[in-house]
Amino acid sequence: MFDLDLAWDRSAHTGSYAGEHVLRVRIRPRAGAGPKGGLPVRMAIALDTSSSMDGEKLARAKQACSSIVGRLRQEDKFWLAAFGTRLIPCLENVAGGGPAASGAQTALGGLKAVGVTRTDYAIEWVERVLQPEPGTVRAGVLITDGHATDPRGNALSDLKPLTDAAARLGARAIALFAVGLGSADDFNTGFLADLGRVSGGAFLYADAPEKLEQELRRRLSSCQAMAAEDATLLVQPVLDDVRIVGLCRIRPDYVSMDVAPSIRIGSLRADAPTDILVSVLVPPKRLEQPLGSIEVLEVRLNYVGGDLSLTTAPIEYTTAFSRAQQVNSEVDQDRLVWAINTYADALNRTTDRNKTGELLSNLAAAAQMAGQGALAGNALKQLDELKSSGKLSAHSRTQVLAQSRDLGGNP
């Protein structure tokens, strides 16, 4: 159902030192890939109903969740729970279709904003209700406007147990989409981004309550377009001195990844490619090797219910410096988007003024090179704010991250 297309950012120059190169692995769906209409979706939404959600935020969140239920297909199923001081299941194993939307409105109507934010309950619930079911796409959605707290309402200082729980979701092929609702000054953006990263999902920023519905609709549509579940990519060096030094998924959603021979990439879409970028330290050409293309990596794709795709990634060695500087513009664009997202992520994990300024400068330069003028302008605006006030708000940092995450998209 899928083909592998490989492309390097540029040729390798024959010299005395190793060079870092970027390989784009494109998983391209064939025509008619997967079942017609996509795989059935199993979606569980955990909605924060702590006291800080009172008012428009909760009203808009209820509306957004009802809207999603109305867009389910008959083969899809949906769960919804409210979490605050305790977790309240509202909808369980609801199939799509006419009656589902009215039932959702009734269930959501009685929810009140009260209590603290037990995010741990929400993640545990997602894992509990989304049981393994072959031939389906499973996704959890966490909607929150505040910090994860203990039973007394104190913000948790140790968030590792929660990110570990999200990682377990990813290991079970459940992608978690963590939504920050309202101003990022009130929640931990880095933590929510980590929940998406370790599970293979994404971080979403709905700084205005009305943005939540469009974000949820977009996520449901992407899930309904999946053609294959639980895909894994194996990238292995052919030569002993080849080293993989970095990995990320650049589309359909950006996700940074740890370097490992086996890369879990989740479900694969039927309507768009899935692209992985691999940063590789390519060694100098050995004396006994001829000039031209030399195989340096082996790439294999495996997914549930599919055939194994296997190919190798040869890179061209050239003696011409000018040839080695000729770049593949598409791959180089993706490399810049990778760099932009790396800077934006780091921006939300530091409060050091000098580090913040350095990251904004680097991000603006990379965005300018990538032709992303709006993002470059925003980064420079934030840099001016930092210089004049000495600090940068969490909202400004998160806004830059949200812009960066939208750059990959579909080619």
Image (spheres, rainbow, N blue to C red):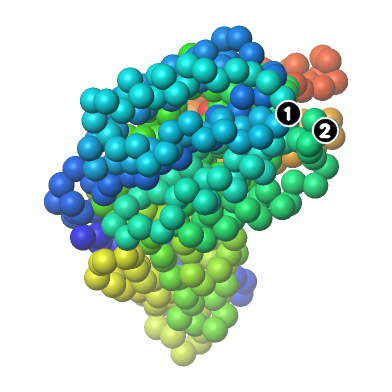
Q: Which residue is mark 2?
A: 152
Left or right: 181, with 316 as reference point:
right
Dot 2: few (<14), some (14–19), or many (≥20) neighbours within 10 Å?
few
Q: Position of residue 254 (x, y in %)?
A: 49, 44
Q: Nearer the viewer, residue 345 or 203?
A: 203
Which quadrant of the rendered structure holds the N terminus? bottom left
Label 1 sits on a secondary structure element that is loop
Left or right: 90, with 157 as reference point:
left
Picture residue at 24% right of the left edge, 60% below the top: 2
Dot 1: few (<14), some (14–19), or many (≥20) neighbours within 10 Å?
many
Label 2 sits on a secondary structure element that is loop
The picture quadrant where one finds residue 134 is bottom left
Left or right: 291, with 380 as reference point:
left
Q: Is residue 201 visible?
A: no
Q: Is residue 256 above or below residue 297?
A: above
Amino acid type of the residue that numbered disc 2 sits on in the rendered structure: Arg
Name the disc covering residue 116, or none. Answer: 1
Q: Nearer the viewer, residue 131 or 90?
A: 90
The picture quadrant where one finds residue 410 is top left
Picture residue at 56% right of the left edge, 45% below the top: 125
Picture residue at 57% right of the left edge, 15% below the top: 57
Q: Position of residue 146 (x, y in %)?
A: 69, 27
Q: Position of residue 288 (x, y in %)?
A: 46, 90
Amino acid type of the residue that numbered disc 1 sits on in the rendered structure: Val
Which quadrant of the rendered structure holds the C terminus? top left
Q: Nearer the viewer, residue 77 or 138?
A: 77
First of labels 1, 2 by sequence position: 1
Q: Is residue 334 above or below residue 239?
A: above
The answer to the question of whether label 1 and label 2 lie on touching residues, with beta carbons closer than 8 A, is yes
